[in-house]
Amino acid sequence: MEEKKQKKINGSFPLQLHHKLAERKKNKNLRTLPDYFPKYDFSSNDYLGFAKVKSITEKAHDLLKEESNINSATSSRLIRGNYSLLEKTERELAAFYQSETALIFNSGYLANLGLLSSILTKDAIVFYDELAHASIRDGLQLGYGRSYKFQHNQVADLAKKIKLQQSKHPNTAIYVITEAIFSMDGDGPNLNEILQVCKNTNCYLIVDEAHSNPIFKLKDLLSEHALNDVFARIVTFGKGIGVHGAAILGSEKLKAYLVNFSRSFIYTTAAAPHMAASIIAAHRHFEADKNQLSFLKENISQFRSVMHQLNLQHYFIESYSQIQSCVIKGNEKVSQAAAFLQEKEFDVRAIKSPTVPQGKERLRFCIHSFNNPSEIEAVLKNLAVYLTDY
């Protein structure tokens, strides 16, 4: 019977892939698509609640009236997919983010792949924070140069490693990439110190703003007038902005380079008009109404205050952002903790290895402008109950 079953697996699905799935299941980290979402959202990236704002949709619809092709860009931008609304969106983004130019990509993942794979030529070197997320690592793997990680947020380690490589390769272009807010820990680097290291060593700084945008603007995280010293910035719109897509911000020369060498930009259908319209509408909405940003920052403060009142801070990774992570070691144990909270209608998700290092599994709490004080207090009190037994 077992032999027949084995043959069936071989015949309908590659045995090697079956074994990989079986290994995931054994390690309690098999991913499945959720079909139920608890009432209280502490897991989505919709930090400002913009995904639910109907006026953004209405304003986007008005912008679409200017376009003849409203459902699709019809081709890549280098063929027939470059249209006036898309260029208008890029101009508004450049102004909003105080950048010389903006170039839209269909997602943040594709933006990182397109940027990093194209600049990492055979004679280039990239240093990246060891906790950089998947799209950064994947982009580096597609490049031809060398990449090295540095210790998380450790500027001295970065400087030492740059000095070592420059002594070996004195005429090599060196890039440094980090995130303004890290997606799993919720913390951020001292960007002024990293930028100073880059200036001292003639390196080029790249900052991924996926989880900081637009809550913590890069100009507020850097010294005055330092924005122009950043080589490239990646901003995404599917999180705090509440729509979809991404853009790479930088100089005119960088934009020209990407248009010529970024494969994830060149060889794909351009962003659809409704995506461009939504990006404009969401940014205009943010500019016109900062109430949600204030609510979010108040909720972050309250979350941290209640955490300390309940003496839970020792379980949490230090963070002042909207991402707060409670470490519970082991895939099975952290999954049980998430299930405990979800049964009480709190949508808190377990982040398991290999997404995070083994022994660093955690519950990741994403705080939003629309979470009310009673929800925040209740979810942390329930967490405290669970951890007492844990």
Image: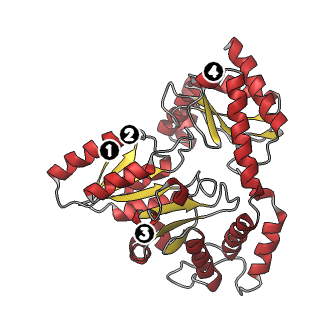
In three-dimensional space, the C-alpha distance between marks 4 and 1, rounded to whole angstroms, equals 35 Å
Q: Is residue 382 visible?
A: yes
On residue 45, which mark appears?
none
- Badge 4 or badge 1: first in the primary sequence: 1
Mark 3 in CB contact with mark 4 (< 8 angstroms)? no
Neighbour tally class for label 1: few under 14, some 14-19, many 20 plus, Cα within 10 Å: many
x 42%, y 58%: residue: 206
Residue 23 in picture, x, y percent from top left: 52, 29
Find out whether the residues at labels 1 and 2 contact each other: C-beta distance under 8 Å: yes
Q: Amino acid at mark 2?
A: Gln
Dot 3: few (<14), some (14–19), or many (≥20) neighbours within 10 Å?
many
In the picture of the structure, the residue carrying the numbered disc 4 is 333
Q: What is the CA distance from the residue labelled 2 to the residue labelled 3?
A: 30 Å
Q: Which residue is mark 1?
A: 158
- Callout in the foreground (4, 1): 1
Residue designated by label 3: 262
Left or right of residue 176, residue 362 in this image: right
Between discs 2 and 4, the one toward the N terminus: 2
